[in-house]
Amino acid sequence: RKARILEIFPPLAKLMSTPVGRLSGGERRMVCLGRGLMSDASLLLVDEPSLGLAPKIGRSVMDALMGVQLRGAAMVIAEQNVSLLEGR
């Protein structure tokens, strides 16, 4: 499962030994989303994944989420920044 998450969020690979409290906001968001994805739930509810993140990091997180292979699951994303979802 960890390998799958590191494929989705490659920047986390170099941070494996860093305590979460020392990570940036975007890195923490990736850890949080990765933990949720590791649960193999059949329904993933993602609330405001870009909240509080720099625009570039928010796009990167959203791109990663949109690329997740759901394997029979469903994902619902609630996001106020509609521009991150447009054209997908």
Image (tube, rainbow, N blue to C red):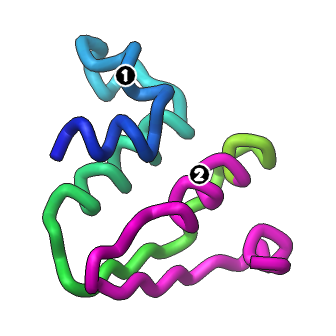
41 magenta-colored: no
The residue beneath circle 1 is 13
Q: Residue at x 33, y 25 (%)?
A: 21
Residue 15's x, y, as percent?
36, 17
Specify whether residue 51 is in view: no
Report the side of 32 relative to 76 (left or right): left
Question: In this rendering, is residue 58 above or below 25?
Answer: below
Instruction: State the quadrant of the C terminus.
Output: bottom right
Question: What percent of the width, then of the height, locates residue 4?
Answer: 28, 45
Residue holding disc 2: 61
**Is residue 66 within the magenta segment?**
yes
Disc 1 and disc 2: Cα gap in Å? 15 Å
Write down the region rendered in magenta: 59-88
SS class of the residue under badge 2? helix
- Amino acid type, callout 1: Ala
Residue 73 visible in rendering: yes
Q: Earlier in the sequence, mark 1 or mark 2?
A: 1
**Which quadrant holds residue 39?**
bottom left
Kindly indicate the quadrant of the structure image that contains residue 23: top left
Count of all numbered marks drawn on residues in the image? 2
Mark 1: which secondary structure? helix
Q: Is residue 22 above or below residue 68?
A: above
Point 45% across, 40% down: residue:
9
Q: Nearer the viewer, residue 13 or 22?
A: 13
Check disc 1: other Cα within 10 Å, few if <14, some if 14-19, many if 20+.
few
| Residue at the image position 36 percent from the left and 87 percent from the top | 74
Mark 2, residues whose alpha carbon is within 10 Å: few (<14), some, or many (≥20)? many
